[in-house]
Image (spheres, coloured by chain):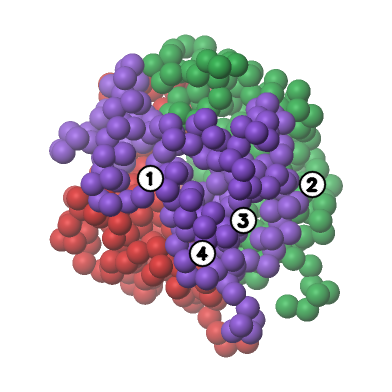
Chain colours: A green, B purple, C red
Amino acid sequence: MSEEKPKRMAIIAGKGGLDEAYPPLILGSTASALDFEVAIFFTFYGLDIVNKKKLKKLKVAPLANPAMPGIGPIQIPNFIGGLPGMTFMATKMMKSWMNNAGVATIPDLLEACILGDVQLIACQMTMDVMGIKREDLIDELEVGGAATFLEFAKDADITMYM
Amino acid sequence: MSEEKPKRMAIIAGKGGLDEAYPPLILGSTASALDFEVAIFFTFYGLDIVNKKKLKKLKVAPLANPAMPGIGPIQIPNFIGGLPGMTFMATKMMKSWMNNAGVATIPDLLEACILGDVQLIACQMTMDVMGIKREDLIDELEVGGAATFLEFAKDADITMYM
Amino acid sequence: MSEEKPKRMAIIAGKGGLDEAYPPLILGSTASALDFEVAIFFTFYGLDIVNKKKLKKLKVAPLANPAMPGIGPIQIPNFIGGLPGMTFMATKMMKSWMNNAGVATIPDLLEACILGDVQLIACQMTMDVMGIKREDLIDELEVGGAATFLEFAKDADITMYM
């Protein structure tokens, strides 16, 4: 625990909704800007965040999230959230909020992680399970398993499943 | 790692359903009772937990949670969970279970955290994104960003995104 | 932090969907194979994972998960996900993917955790709240509270709420 050793953060990103992609990327890029060593392990649905075809099209489900903000004072109830078109609307709303508040987009946050030397690891097992090929994923990552993640995480100061 | 230094726990509360508000508040208040230093960072939907108008009205979504207990042996299927009124019913059921089992309410748990000197931090970015003002939130918190959280968390013994 | 001391991982498993049961069990069993000391605390819906009647019947909700893979190129939209039968179909699909990729089943992963001396702890409060009896749960676990978990977790190298 000498002061010279950089702090280390190990994140598992296991979810692939648009709103679920922000937390690991914001925390990861911020930590790298603060000179932390950071690794993000993308697994299960989280693999979408580094999938070339999907990362720009992540969506927000308006369903099953009673805390989701509505349009002004109007909350989207679950029975409306299930109607066709509402996933599109909720996704659009969130992108517009983030943009209005000056928050970077998912591709921009991913770029910030890459520039900040955040180690990006794609879960081999998930790729096998879902039939995802190496070329489907962005170039700037390595492929590994739970053991790869644990090897990094065991000496981390902050560990998070997000 | 001397024995004199108190243990430290850093929690990110990122979700705002009623059932999702219990884990960070129960863990946070228990840890503070055990003399841990605790900070909870409320971000994204989790900000509802410290929103004066919303904290007593947090809801449970009956949807998309196949593990949610039903009424006695009856499970709520997704196609019923989407009907009007079911969020209300699921919320009511959970409050009744918690009450019957002697579990404190969300306002009570929050009070326990405050009395136990748990540091409550509201995410500035989320406030900007969702148009939430300082006065919308309970008095006993500070406003900060991901860097504020990381500064506390980097020396924590337990870190959790809940 | 001598090299002789084994690394330690403390996991809270708080969700009970089939897809949500894999991450804690895969990570826990892998870590134990790497000679970590591991404890998993099953709480809220996560208690289903160690419930004798439920652990073989965990389900995947097709709803509110816009990242869920579809059948080939076809994504299940939310308004279809809410129809009767879709939870069954989504559950079946996931089991078939996992099986085709050679991933162990939930009962097998649980067995691997037990054989690997992973400490399994059932949350007393959840049992009280949901009316779950000791005999409803698998034999190989102990019953405890948040304080039991914190006692183990405070000296852990990796802590995760999954």
Residue B116 visible? The answer is: yes
**Which tag is nearer the camera, tag 2 or tag 3?**
3
Viewer-proximal residue, A158 or B156? B156
Q: Residue at x 63, y 66 (%)?
A: B156
Quadrant of residue C109 in the image? bottom left
- Give me the residue at 68% from left, 26% from top: B131
Q: Residue at x 33, y 72 (%)?
A: C115
**Residue B8's quadrant in the figure?**
bottom right
Q: Earlier in the sequence, mark 1 or mark 3?
A: 1
- Regarding mark 2 in the picture, which secondary structure is present there? helix
- Residue B142, which numbered label? none
Q: Are marks 1 and 4 on the same chain?
A: yes
Q: Residues within 10 Å of mark 1 (few under 14, many from 20)?
A: some
Protein chain holding label 1:
B
Whichever of labels 4 and 3 marks the residue nearer the N terminus, that label is 4
| Secondary element at image label 1 | loop
> Alpha-carbon distance for marks 1 and 2?
43 Å
Position in image of residue B54 (x %, y %)? 50, 32
**Front-most of residues B106 and B160:** B106
Give whichever of discs 1 and 4 has the lower sequence position: 4
**Does residue A125 appear in the picture of this structure?**
no
Amino acid carrying mark 3 in the image: Gln
Which chain does the numbered disc 4 sit on?
A: B
Q: Quadrant of the N terminus of chain C?
A: bottom right
Q: Tell me which corner region of the image, top left, top right, bottom left or bottom right, holds residue C133.
A: bottom left
Q: Mark 4 and mark 2, same subunit?
A: no
Name the residue beneath numbered marker 2. Answer: A114
The span from disc 1 to disc 3 (Cα, nearest Å) is: 19 Å
Residue identified by numbered label 4: B32
Q: Which residue is mark 1?
A: B105
Q: Residues within 10 Å of mark 2 (few under 14, many from 20)?
A: some
User: Viewed as shown, does residue C112 lie left or right of C67?
Assistant: left
